Amino acid sequence: MNMTSYFRPIIRTGSLRSEKSIFLAKTNYWISEAEEIKFGEKTKLVSINNVPDWWKKRWLKKRSDILGMEFGFPKLMGILNVTPDSFSDGGNHIKLAAALNQAKFMEENGADIIDIGGESTRPGALPVPILEEIKRIEPVIYGISARSKIPISVDTRKSEVASAARKAGASMVNDVSSFTFDPNLLSYCLKHKLPVCVMHMQGSPENMQNNPKYENILIEVFNFLENQIGTLVQAGISRDQIIADVGIGFGKSIVHNLTLIKNISLFHGLGVPLLLGVSRKSIISNVSKGEKPSDRVNGSISLAISALGQGVQLFRVHDVAETKQAFDLWVAVNFGE
């Protein structure tokens, strides 16, 4: 779809609202104004009355439940990397017992879904052979699904890995390449009716941080995700089973990342649930302190709260208990009686 104007809804909460406001996706967030964004022009604030119906329909549409997750309130995706080299927790959960204990801990502390990855996609990471990736994730997924009904997603770019994960008990695919790496992954997800998450990344993990450039980060990321979602829908995957991720830290500078988080409500125009993955990332230590990823918990929660205030529905996090506590309080203050 060719667009000259893009509209970022100004998300608000509270009972004192404009009579002309509309509710975001049938939640308690409401919208009465939007920021109009154009290539090469200064943005401007406009009334909801001046927003095209196409955008408002996308904002209004209730987000369908995915794997039992109802998106009226924020949901937490617990990160479980079974890799030796992931940027934050690489090596911590290589042993099966450690991985299963961490999954149990995250579930008990509020995780709604567990995302399991066997290949690091940190900046500079090289691809992992298919059999090695399967060897890492398969027993963990079997172990979790044998003792829990919590939904499991697999963080992979490869159809063979997705197949092994599904047979072990995973029921969703989270692909950082947005189905551009393996041409067979899309058809596999379609055949087995798996919900999917598509993410924006400029380049590949090996080279994505080599001087990333954009003319307009918001418009370019929006267009990419809109086109990829359109490709999936045209192939037969229901839009109701797609989640979108702007890809913080994947082919983006500090300024790019901050701009996306500040304006993330723009992506409600995709008409699907939004996922934010900013947990423990280097953007935090680039702006403040926290050289070690484990020292970035407070910064992770701060960025997540910023996005929560803009209506983001799903958060991929390492620190489930801490994030859940912060979210519970935010929801109580903003949506409580």
Image (tube, helix red, strand yellow):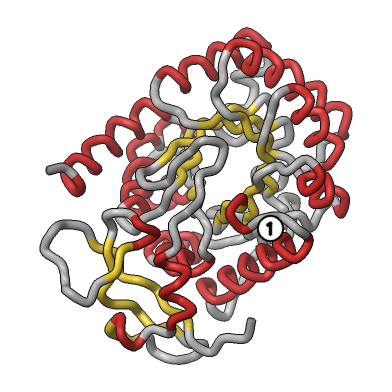
Query: Which residue is pictured at 67% across the width and 24% down the height?
Result: 82
Query: Which residue is pictured at 35% across the width and 34% down the height?
Result: 323
Residue found farthest to the top: 97
Q: Can residue 288 be seen at all in this image of the molecule?
A: no
How many marks do you count on the picture? 1
Q: Position of residue 259 (x, y in %)?
A: 43, 66
Q: Position of residue 7 (x, y in %)?
A: 42, 78
Quadrant of the snapshot with the C terminus? top left
Query: Which residue is pictured at 61% across the width and 55% down the height?
Result: 250
Q: Residue 20 lies in what quarter of the image?
A: bottom left
How packed mark 1 is, by other alpha carbons closer than 10 Å (few <14, some 14-19, many 20 or more), is some
* Residue closest to the eye, 167 or 200: 167
**Residue position for label 1:** 208
Q: Position of residue 243 (x, y in %)?
A: 57, 52
Q: Residue 89 lies in what quarter of the image?
A: top right
Query: Which residue is pictured at 79% across the width and 58% down the height?
Result: 180
Residue 213 in the image: above or below residue 336: below
Q: Residue 263 lies in what quarter of the image?
A: bottom left
* Residue closest to the eye, 179 or 280: 179
Residue 162 in the image: above or below residue 10: above
On screen, residue 33 versus residue 315, left or right, reads left
Q: Position of residue 112 (x, y in %)?
A: 47, 31
On screen, residue 159 versus residue 234, left or right, reads right
* Residue closest to the eye, 100 or 147: 147
Secondary structure type for disc 1: loop
Q: Can residue 185 be seen at all in this image of the molecule?
A: yes
On screen, residue 14 versus residue 227, left or right, reads left
On screen, residue 297 versus residue 11, left or right, reads right
Under mark 1, the amino acid is Met
Residue 7 in the image: above or below residue 282: below
Quadrant of the snapshot with the N terminus? bottom right
